[in-house]
Image (cartoon, rainbow, N blue to C red):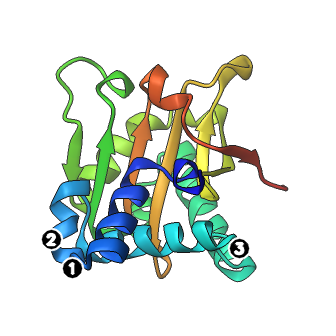
């Protein structure tokens, strides 16, 4: 079934909006995303269901530039560069397994997210851009063992949201593909 190829948030946004005409602002709390991001999730799902690519080549190239800038800033611990690539109201969600016990799983705001991202810098040497569910993301796989996957919502030239997937069960779900260097 085609719907099985969608990640859960895409499936929910697509079905509720397309089948039941539920507005995006009512779907957003269900998928824990902003209404704008929820609309993008439904759009990606619609493209997948129709059999067309999730993103055009130009969007992939732009997203790749943003993700590359994020990785470079993370690796270098460059707060100014991180703040430049993060939207002011950026939100970072993470599986509890991604961070030390007691760390927040949801963090909002460019400054706070940037400070926590610098901590990610230690792992970023193992990070590589990849297609994660058809869009540009990041995988962290030291010695070939998948440890983390990051998925991004990019608006314009900035990261509006990103998710850190570390739960082993969730790491088996994404569709991963290599990106050309």
Position of 29 relative to 128 (above/below) = below
| Pointers 1 and 2 in contact (C-beta within 8 Å) | yes
* Position of residue 60 measured from the top left corner of the image (x, y, whole percent): 68, 71
Q: Earlier in the sequence, mark 3 or mark 2?
A: 2
In the current view of this chain or complex, which residue is farthest to the right? 180
Seen from the viewer's position, the closer of residues 105 and 172 is 172
16 horizontally vs 84: left or right: left
73 horizontally vs 33: left or right: right
Q: Which label lies toward us, 3 or 2?
A: 2
* Position of residue 77 measured from the top left corner of the image (x, y, whole percent): 47, 46
Residue at mark 1 to residue at mark 2: CA–CA distance: 6 Å
Are there few (<14), some (14-19), or many (20+) residues within 10 Å of tag 3?
few
* Kind of element beneath mark 1: loop
Corner quadrant of residue 181: bottom right
Position of 22 relative to 8 (above/below) = below
Seen from the viewer's position, the closer of residues 41 and 156 is 41
Identify the residue under disc 3.
61
Residue at mark 3 to residue at mark 2: CA–CA distance: 32 Å
Corner quadrant of residue 48: bottom right
Residue at 65% x, 27% y is: 141
Q: Earlier in the sequence, mark 1 or mark 3?
A: 1
Is residue 94 visible to the viewer in this orientation of the structure? Answer: yes
Identify the residue under disc 2.
26
Number of numbered tags placed on the structure image = 3
Identify the residue under disc 1.
23
Are there few (<14), some (14-19), or many (20+) residues within 10 Å of tag 2?
some
* Kind of element beneath mark 3: helix
Residue at mark 1 to residue at mark 3: CA–CA distance: 30 Å
């Amino acid at each position: 079934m085609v719907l099985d190829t969608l990640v859960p948030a895409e499936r929910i946004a697509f079905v509720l909006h397309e089948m039941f005409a539920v507005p995006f602002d009512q779907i957003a709390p269900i998928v824990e995303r902003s209404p704008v991001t929820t609309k993008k999730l439904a759009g990606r799902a619609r493209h997948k269901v129709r059999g067309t690519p999730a993103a055009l080549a130009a969007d992939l190239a732009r997203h790749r530039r943003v993700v590359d800038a994020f990785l470079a800033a993370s690796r270098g611990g460059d707060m100014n560069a991180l703040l430049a690539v993060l939207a002011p109201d950026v939100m970072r969600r993470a599986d509890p397994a991604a961070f030390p016990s007691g760390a927040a799983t949801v963090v909002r705001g460019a400054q706070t997210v940037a400070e926590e991202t610098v901590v990610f810098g230690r792992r970023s040497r193992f990070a590589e851009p990849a297609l994660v569910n058809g869009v540009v993301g990041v995988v962290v796989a030291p010695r070939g063992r998948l440890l983390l996957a990051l998925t991004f919502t990019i608006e314009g030239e900035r990261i509006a949201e990103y998710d850190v997937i570390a739960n082993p069960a969730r790491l088996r779900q994404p569709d991963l593909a290599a990106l050309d260097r």
